[in-house]
Image: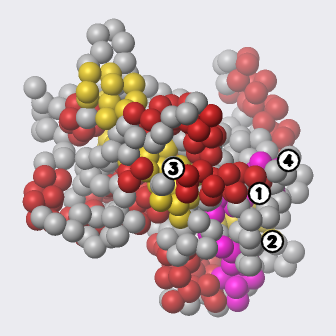
Amino acid sequence: MPLTLFEKIWNSHRIIEGENQPDLIYIDRIFLHERTGSFALKSLKERGLSVKNPKHVFATMDHIIDTFPGRGDETLMPGGKKFITTMRYLAKEFNITLFDIDDPRHGISHLISAEQGITLPGSIVTCPDSHTCTLGALGAIGWGVGSSDCEHALATTTLSGIKPKQMKVTFNGKLNEGVNPKDMMLHLIEKYSASGGSGYAIEFSGDTIHMMPIENRFTLCNMAVEFSAFTGIIAPDQKVFKYLKDRPYSPTNNWSENIKHWKCLASDDNAVFDKYIEINASDIYPSVTWGLSPEESIPINGKIPRANNLTNHEKNKDMASTLEYMGLKNGQSLMGLPIDAAFIGSCTNARLTDLRSAAKILKNNKISPNIKAICTPGSADVKKQAEQEGIDKIFKDAGFQWREPGCSLCFYAGGEGFLPQQRVITSTNRNFRGRQGNGVRSHLASPVTVAASAIAGKIVPPQTITKQ
């Protein structure tokens, strides 16, 4: 029977096939962070249970920590220090590998799981974080779970789950100038809604994907969860094999045999998907969100839809509330809308290629006066490489704050945030109410759009700066 890539991996990890109930699946690697991972470990300890395979469990500090230079365990989040010290203590007690704040391998969980070679093609990796789907770019199943499921995986190396339906999203053609994978996902979600992927595992394919650098593929898979998908995945190819070679946790023996196996990780030619979506890359333009969901986005030169064009009364009502929160109006254009702040970071867009692309826009430019601009690299390794290339100097000369790695202003939990009603253009993945601080108005965009807008002091496409 022909199978999709997801089905091949899922089936190979199935321990027990459920009849009218979930399958029992073997988990290869478990990744924790200090916010939710500490809960899972604490619960294990209280129940007198152990971690079944400590060598396959890894942890980092990313959600609660501050990103200011010279940081320590103290954090702006009330009670935040307790998360950090608890994770440190429990990681030692359970003998699991911790990438602590001062560790040169430290960073956001989904970035360093890939950077360190912890995630490999054909594996299943779980983490108590919804953006674990990022790891699908390596041809793996990234499975985001809650703390209780994570606790079960820690104790048993298994999880129960119902196999999702299969969706194939194909991008073909050449991308327009200034278009980034972030724009691709905003386009997809805007066209098919934020719930369009619900109940599906999504395989991204097409010549646009094939030509894409590996780091850009991480952005696509990262935002599969914003489409409500179970996960996103891309068949591994030579770019993936090259990326993983000589990573600290990558296999050191029989490398050619591993590649031979990984090359088999592709959907069969006649595999049947439950749903197909095809997108012409030339239809995608630099995009920005106007509302409180990634689906509420438009091309920068477009206009906010008019509420009276919606047939559903509740949607009209929700849209009115959204526009009031965002300080916007029906039919308004976002082009030229003044901003107060700009942020480049997060597990979506804080890799080296993201920073390089933004630096090309910022070089020999200054951000607009009175704009607060912050860049937070995704990992210590990204930060180090960026500094070796002089990217940090370009950001700082332009007026950006250059920070330490972490989730930073992507995730507000009472720690650092922007001010109420400030308008922020951000490379993060979520624009929910209060996501970057109470009352903050967040507009999602690609790193190059964020950089260009910071220079202009208003929302503009990257071409506005590059063509000056």
Estimate the x, y position of residue 111 in percent, counting from the top left. 48, 61
Estimate the x, y position of residue 440 in percent, counting from the top left. 82, 51
Give the mark nearer the N terminus: 3 vs 1.
1
In magenta, the rendered stretch is 395-417
Estimate the x, y position of residue 29 in percent, counting from the top left. 38, 47
Pointers 3 and 1 in contact (CB under 8 A)?
no
Quote the CA–CA distance across marks 3 and 4: 37 Å
Secondary element at image label 4:
loop
Which of the two discs, 3 and 1, sits closer to the camera?
Answer: 3
Give the mark nearer the N terminus: 4 vs 2.
2
Quote the CA–CA distance across marks 2 and 1: 26 Å
Left or right: 277 as drawn, with respect to 31: left
Which of the two discs, 2 and 1, sits closer to the camera?
Answer: 1
Residue at screen point 63% across, 63% down: 406
Q: Which residue is mark 3?
A: 94
Quote the CA–CA distance across marks 3 and 1: 20 Å
Q: Amino acid at mark 3?
A: Phe
Pointers 2 and 1 in contact (CB under 8 A)?
no
Give the mark nearer the N terminus: 1 vs 4.
1
Q: Quadrant of residue 84?
A: bottom right
What is the crowding at mark 1: few (fewer than 14 residues within 10 Å), some, or many (at least 20)? some
Q: Which residue is mark 2?
A: 372
Which of the two discs, 3 and 4, sits closer to the camera?
Answer: 3
